[in-house]
Image: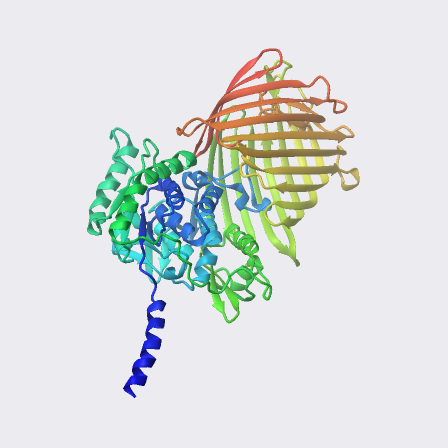
Amino acid sequence: MRALAAFALSLLLPVAVTAEPPQPRLALVLSGGGARGIAHVGVLRALEEAGLPVDAIAGTSMGAAVGALYTSGGDAEQLERVVRRLDWAQLFVGRSDRRVLPVTRRDDRHADWVTLRFEGGAPRWPAGLLAEHRINRFLIEHLAAAGYAAGGDFDRLRVPFRAVATDLASGERVVLARGDLARAVRASMSVPVVFPPVAWEGRTLVDGGLVDNVPTSVARDFGAAVVVAVDITSPPPETLDTSFAVGAQVTELLTRRRNEDFAAQADLVVRPDLGGLNAGDFDRFDALIRAGYEATRAAVPEIRALLLAKGVSDLARRPAPAPGPALAGAPITEVTARGPQRASEALLRRLFNVPLGPGYVMERGLRAFDKVAASGLLEHAWLEFEPVGEGVRLVLRGSDAAPNQLGLGLGYSEWEKARASLRLRHQNALGFGEQVELLLSGSDALLLARASLRGDRLFVAGLGYRLAASLAADKPRFFDAEGERQGRTRFERATASAALEVPFERWGALAAGARFGRVSTFSEPGVPLPETRDTVAELFAELTLDNLDDLLWPQAGGRLVVRAEAALDALGAERPHRRLGVEARLARAFGRTALDVAGRYATSRDGVPLYDQFRLGGLELPGHRQEELKGPHALALSAGLRRPLGGSGLQALARVGLGDTFADRVRASGLRWGASVGLGYSSRVGPIRLELGMREGGATMVSLGVGGD
């Protein structure tokens, strides 16, 4: 009997031994450091080329992001493609991406510079200076499937992984080894004040760099034979004569002591020569990746020697753990919302609009997630995936946003001088996602007060509506043929409108409606006009197709807008006329150079009044003042180039164009020409630009602008 038991044990013992995971050979530590963390991509590429296996990764902040993306993908080349997909500079500088909002909710002209939410009359201060939706979306898109297949166990990823975060309440280090992989990375890179913190199992987590920016001790816990740390932390500033330098040094001093609590000795520390590249240089991908690659390639002989000294001779890539359930194609068995109280689950599910039964497709799920985020109903939104039998449960998690929002917009241009706008919004006014808005805007060229109600559903899904009433004082300038100012006039408009809207996802919409009111013309010195008071009664339709990333300085996407208006005497219009306008723009980036081409065609019939004539100039016809040319017909074509100047944040701008307005019909011959060159800078208050314009006849002009036109 004993012999039989021993024989049975001998059969079982090899099975038990082989079931144990093999000891990691090389564990990699990827530190945080903002844009400098992009250098980790070059590190991984150099290790792959040398045939050195990475069996485990521990990362903090940007190091956690790069490490998790690598553990979830195929190789370093694929990692680089994924990392380059997101405009990190736009994300961390805080420049908005207009494509996040549906076309029907965009207002490029009156973009808010700062917003503040209110609830019950009390302000609710934002938890972070920058919006989090784009980074949340990016992490979910690229990490959710791998985390789902691993069953939330980071040891079952292609490469075992750990992310490091900080408990905001206690200051403790939190090592994340299980749970939602995308959300773990989001927590690790939640820079305090910049991004909102992340709720995690009863804790509030922020950036792990506050306590352990180079988590070598976490990597040691994998039990690897060799631990290599990549330290890309910023060096101390050379001078302390600016507020930024002082702030950076204070932060370094405050966090250095806590980092020492978890300091551990790596077998080798790789420090890429990042020179003057700092934490905000997200537009320097090539230089950052090259620095990481070259530093690691130089360290390859030493890494090989360390592995051999530890008895590691087999450097073959080990097979990944057996994959778990696949998220892509998993039948959607349930869709639920957790967290919000004010926004009903029925409303959120209608906005999310993912049907039960079909297999899950990430692209469709993210589009639905975008709709919820764009609604403004949630302050924080996240998308989770839970296995249910053979299918998946989609969980929309979030917290209610304060219903009232105050927005302030500021700007300056040669055309308007100083410009300011004040916007009051109330979300979910009637309980079905409606938005009520009051806009007050003033400049030297236009005074505007507008109240509106907008909804995304009228009787049936996919049919929205817009009601608006406005008072405006339009004060255009008039110029002679050489661009010299003659004077100005004033048109006062009081109108009300109603329209139906059919949206096409976020990138398009078809709207049609009617507008009624009065327009009063007042004569001003230099531009004698008869004073009139006209009744307005018109039908209008507008088709918009727009996925342009930025309206002033685009580098991706296109835009097409077709507008038709008919003022009809049958409706009571005193000045019947018809107008048709077509605007198009296309942008594309070639490396670091962005090219955009814009065109406009506009025509009218039946004696369009002066206040409804087309206006041309500025971007459409460089070298000419904004709205300088006016007429019943217009034609323009322009092209612009934009390229960053080193890492200073400055951009070189150049634009050329042809165009004119016409009294009788559009003609392609004898068009005016214009050109401009200048410098631009993207800031928190919007784009800042200084340009020198030239035009036919040799006249020049200098213009300064802050914010969009």
From the viewer's perspective, tell me whether residue 300 is left or right of residue 583: left
- Residue 689 lies, with reference to residue 480, above or below; the image says below
Residue 283 visible to an observer of this rendering = no
Question: Looking at the image, which residue is at 70% across and 42% down?
Answer: 541
Work out whether residue 327 or residue 428 is closer to the camera in this orientation and state it.
Answer: 327
Colouring mode (rainbow / by chain / secondary structure / one colour): rainbow
Give the side of residue 519 with respect to residue 198, left or right: right
Q: Residue furthest top?
A: 697
Instruction: Work out whether 651 lies above or below 29.
Output: above
Q: Quadrant of the C terminus?
A: top right
In the orientation shown, which residue stands out farthest toward the front? 3
Residue at coordinates 55% horizontally, 40% vertically from top-left? 107
* In the image: residue 274, left or right of residue 236: right
* Residue 269 lies in quadrant: top left
Closer to the camera in the image, 626 or 23: 23
**Camera-side residue: 294 or 499?**
294
Position in image of residue 286 (x %, y %): 42, 35
Q: Residue 379: horizontal and vertical position, in percent?
A: 44, 53
| Quadrant that contains the N terminus | bottom left
